[in-house]
Amino acid sequence: MRRGSRPWATPARKPWGARWWNWASTPPPTRAALLEAATAEGQLVGYELELTTRGGDKRTVLQSMSPIEVNGEACWLFGLHDITERKQTEQRVREREELLSLTIEAAALGLWDWNLHSGEVTGDARWRVMYGLAPVEPGASAAVHWASGITPEDIDVVTQELRRHLQEPHKPFDVTCEVLAPQGGGRWIRSVGKVVAYDTAGQPARMVGMSIDVSSQRQQERQLERMAHYDALTGLPNRVMLERRLRAGMEHSRARGQQLGVAYLDLDGFKPVNDRLGHAAGDRLLVVVAERLKRALRLSDSVARLGGDEFVILLSGLAHAEECERRLHTVMESVAAPYTLDGERVLVTASIGYTLYPDDEADADTLLRHADQAMYAAKQAGRNRFHGFDAAEERARQLRREQCGELLRALQRGELTLFLQPKVDMRLGTVVGAEALARWQHPERGLLSPVHFLHLIEGHTELQMRFGEWVVDTALQQIARLMAQGLELPVSINITPEHLHRRGFADWMALRLAQHPAVPARLLAIELTESAALYDIDHVARELTRLRALGMQISFDDFGTGYSSLAYLRRLPMDHLKLDRSFVAGMLGDAGDRAIVQGVIGLAHSFGCGIVAEGVETVEQGLALLQMGCHHAQGYCIAMPMPVEQFMDWAKAWQAPAPWRATSQAAAPVPPAAAIAA
Ligand code: C2E
Ligand code: CA
Ligand code: CA
């Protein structure tokens, strides 16, 4: 009798024969009973046993016996198979399944199975409840079409999400749809699933997943959203919502080529109401104001409350500022009408600042800031009025800020330089000094003269100080370079009035000089204008006296253009007057200018100081000046301002024009007293 061939070698196909016992469920059969069973059936039988090893370990084993033939003799083969791991795994799987079913139960999840070919979905009882479907009648089909009961928009959403999931199968299908309940009022159902089967053509065939009702979560989200975007007291949009609307409004007006009015409104007289009638009354007033504002505006406009008694109004579709002001006028009137609070008549008004976008081409935050700035101006101007923000003025201010920054950087990068323009004695043909004039070697715009940048330092303290320091240091370095070439010439620098009026100006100058000990102070001169000297003359006189004591020289620039009283000027120490170039330019053709030139020369002589004529452009002008007793001059006909290296060569080679030299052989110049009398 053939007993079969080693059936345990292929357990998958024939797992443990026809019979086996689980010791846990039934008491293990006796060996005799087993033998009997095996003999009767002629095949493998087995049973599970729990054994304790010598080490005290509990193991589950499967004892089996099978009839075999050895050398034609029927025998029994006994086997002992350790199945502890398998049993443990089975136990874990059972526990997991229990846990999963508990989770599904506790989370109120509905399970579903979607046939992607037919589009039909079947779900469990909970899933049917979520979708508002009646329980399945016995014998009826449980399947429904996936798109039934959801809105057309959600149908698109589901289709897109399915497509997405098929492209990225590792990320589950996850969609939340509004399910329309038959008795009205929707429910939000979130469904998460995964494709689990494909057909032979590789097309997705089946998806399984679960659904959960997230309606209450949705409601909370909406509530939070309301709280996040609306003001609790007045129900008006809050700052967050305002910013959103503002950005949308900006886009809209740009697209339409219209202006958007952004107005900042602050109530006048709100605080006294609050203080006198209490916060509750103040709150009621704000609610009424909010109502009135809404009514005074059109549907396309909007109003938001920023907090306190501050509101922002957006006026759309404006053609120009007048239209904006007309509409703001209506708003102001509606706010200004009397209120009754606790039986009392209360009056408040509005101060409004506005700006127009895109005339004011700023970002949303800046527009609000501009409107706020303008509101402040309306308050300053007496309240109960509106004030428009001046975008052009702001642009100019902004440009100036940028340019100041650029100049500061230019100073740090060494883009500025001092050119020297010689001062000469026309009669003797000698170079007597130089004036240092600032230039900016701009990387893009080329060489710039001071008119292009000097205005930037006015009123800009930091720039002023940095620039002043740079001028003095650079001039002192240049003097040192000239000295090294054997040219010991005084160099004058120009000082701004603001700088001169700064406290401790002379001390500061002394400090700068101390940084350059090789340069004697007598070689550094300062030029300041009459008007600079006049303001706070006591301070100026003190500072100039200190500078003089240091050894420096002082020149009065553009002399004759100011309105200084001689009595005042007399109090100031001075070494030279610089005759303004406008008189030099006019003196040959204009008797008045000539008289002024003559007068200033006389004044210099009688004050006992030197005189330098500025802006000498022709030999004739020089000659006339010489004849009037002014020997020192500066101007294009002598030399243009130039870099210091060039100046050194120029100074060594310069020769005065022949007509000027000729005057040195002629009679002595007119004495000062006679000059004044003339
Ligand atoms: P300023 O002190 O009156 O300087 C004389 C100006 O006249 C210079 O102009 C010079 O180039 C110009 N000039 C010289 N000769 C002639 C001439 O024959 N004809 C004409 N039409 N003009 C002549 P620049 O260099 O453009 O400087 C303009 C002003 O800028 C200066 O007037 C001075 O007030 C100011 N400045 C220049 N450098 C500095 C500086 O380092 N610091 C300060 N605070 N101001 C400076
Ligand atoms: Ca000057
Ligand atoms: Ca001048």
Image (cartoon, grey):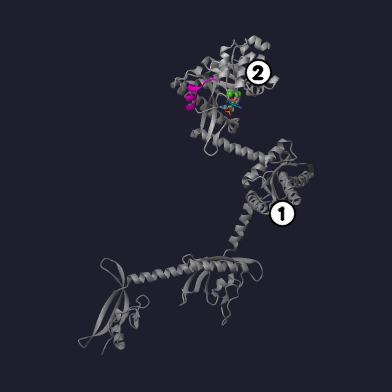
**Span highlighted in magenta in the image:** 645-656
Q: In which of the image's four quarters is ligand 3 placed?
A: top right
Element under disc 2: helix
Q: Which mark is residue 597?
A: 2
Q: Is mark 1 within 8 Å of ligand 1?
A: no
- How far across and how far down the image is residue 649, in percent? 47, 25
Residue that label 1 marks: 300
Give the mark nearest the N terminus, 1 or 2: 1
Q: Which is the main secondary structure of the residues drawn in magenta?
A: helix
Tag 1 secondary structure = loop
Residue 377: which quarter of the image? top right
Point out the image quarter for the N terminus.
bottom left
Residue at the location (54% across, 31% down)?
439
**Is 602 placed left or right of 193 in the picture?**
right
Q: Is residue 623 above or below residue 294?
A: above
Horizontal side of 195 relative to 272 (left or right) equals left
Is 382 in the magenta?
no
Q: Position of residue 506 (x, y in %)?
A: 54, 20
How would you rate the neighbour count of disc 1 (Cα within 10 Å): few for under 14, some for 14-19, many for 20 or more? few
Q: How far is the residue under mark 1 from the one under mark 2?
A: 70 Å
Quarter of the image for residue 264 reads top right
- 1 and 2 marks in contact (CB < 8 Å): no
Image location (x, y in percent) of residue 638? 56, 23
